[in-house]
């Protein structure tokens, strides 16, 4: 352990590590609080030490073979949690563990671990506008593909109530109901006025906050952000492009 501490310039804490019998292969299993108790007060020191110790013993990733599909890397939850708590970027964690970023994200989802990198604020209207500009076209594209694929399928009547069959029929060929009513059928906050007057103590529905985009901004977004975009980072890179475009046009009148 002393050699590792000397390499990262933390040999002044060697006595604490020796007293607690801490070896390089268990450093990454220690939480930030436990490292503070060993004398490391700054996150920069913790990061340097973890990066140096990640290749030792129990810290090294094991590859697990499964019956179907390619083998997968086993990333211990405590190691992943500690790296995230120390403010490592997902890209840095992937490089450090020699795995892909998608593998890191899958393990985070498996362990229910989240990381806020500060790129999406749900209370920021500009961020929400960029999010919608990125993913709504993609969602609609997938829905259109599904709709076209099932457009000629016959309606299944097994275990379907008359109401369900009527709604399904209206979706395919509207009869006796306006298109606008059908489009908003079941949408929260959109009710028949005659029914709405009879509902007592109804739960209030608040209008969505909207960020007004200029025509130039919308045209720029449509040019750059296509519904058929492909991303290797779960669309985060596309979202950041959309956010930059909206910021660029934020002063447009």
Image (tube, grey):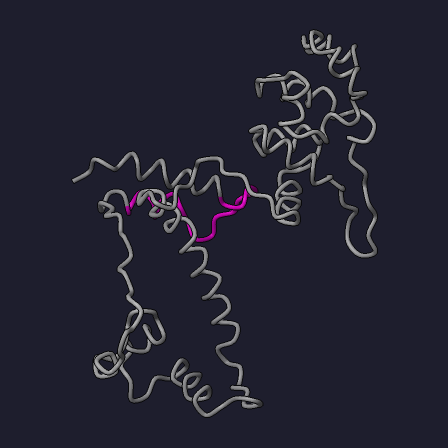
Q: Quadrant of residue 181?
A: bottom left
At 68% across and 19% down in the image, what residue appears? 38
Start and end of the magenta stretch? 218-235
At 68% across and 28% down in the image, what residue appears? 96
User: In the picture shown, does residue 147 fall above or below 56?
Assistant: below
Residue 77, image x and y in percent? Answer: 70, 40
At 52% across and 72% down in the image, what residue appears? 149
Residue 51, image x and y in percent? Answer: 68, 22
Q: In this view, which residue lies farthest toward the bottom?
A: 162
Residue 228, image x and y in percent? Answer: 47, 52
User: In the picture shown, does residue 28 fall above or below 125?
Assistant: above
Quarter that holds the N terminus: top right
Is residue 219 one of those drawn in magenta? Answer: yes
Quarter that holds the C terminus: top left
User: In the picture shown, does residue 22 fall above or below 111?
Assistant: above
Q: Quadrant of residue 103?
A: top right
Instruction: Tell me: 244 left or right of 237.
Output: left
Is residue 172 one of those drawn in magenta? Answer: no
At 32% across and 78% down in the image, what residue appears? 182
């Amino acid at each position: 352990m002393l050699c590792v501490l000397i390499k990262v310039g933390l040999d002044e804490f060697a006595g604490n590590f020796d007293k607690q019998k801490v070896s390089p292969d268990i450093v990454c299993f220690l939480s930030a609080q436990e490292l503070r108790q060993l004398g490391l007060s700054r996150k920069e020191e913790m990061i340097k030490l973890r990066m140096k110790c990640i290749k030792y013993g129990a810290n090294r990733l094991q590859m697990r073979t499964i019956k179907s599909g390619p083998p997968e890397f086993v990333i211990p939850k405590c190691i992943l949690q500690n790296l995230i708590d120390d403010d490592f970027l997902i890209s840095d964690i992937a490089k450090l563990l020699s795995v892909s970023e998608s593998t890191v994200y899958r393990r985070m989802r498996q362990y229910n671990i989240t990381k806020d990198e500060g790129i999406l604020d749900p209370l920021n209207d500009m961020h929400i506008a960029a999010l919608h500009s990125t993913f709504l076209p993609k969602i609609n594209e997938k829905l259109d593909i599904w709709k076209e694929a099932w457009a000629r399928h016959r309606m299944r009547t097994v275990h379907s109530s008359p109401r369900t069959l009527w709604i399904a029929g209206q979706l395919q060929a509207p009869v006796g109901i306006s298109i606008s009513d059908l489009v908003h059928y079941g949408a929260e906050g959109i009710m028949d006025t005659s029914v709405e007057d009879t509902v007592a103590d109804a739960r209030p529905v608040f209008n969505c906050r909207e960020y007004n985009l200029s025509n130039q901004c919308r045209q720029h977004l449509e040019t750059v952000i296509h519904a058929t975009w492909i991303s290797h980072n779960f669309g985060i890179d596309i979202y950041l492009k959309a956010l930059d475009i909206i910021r660029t046009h934020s002063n447009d009148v």
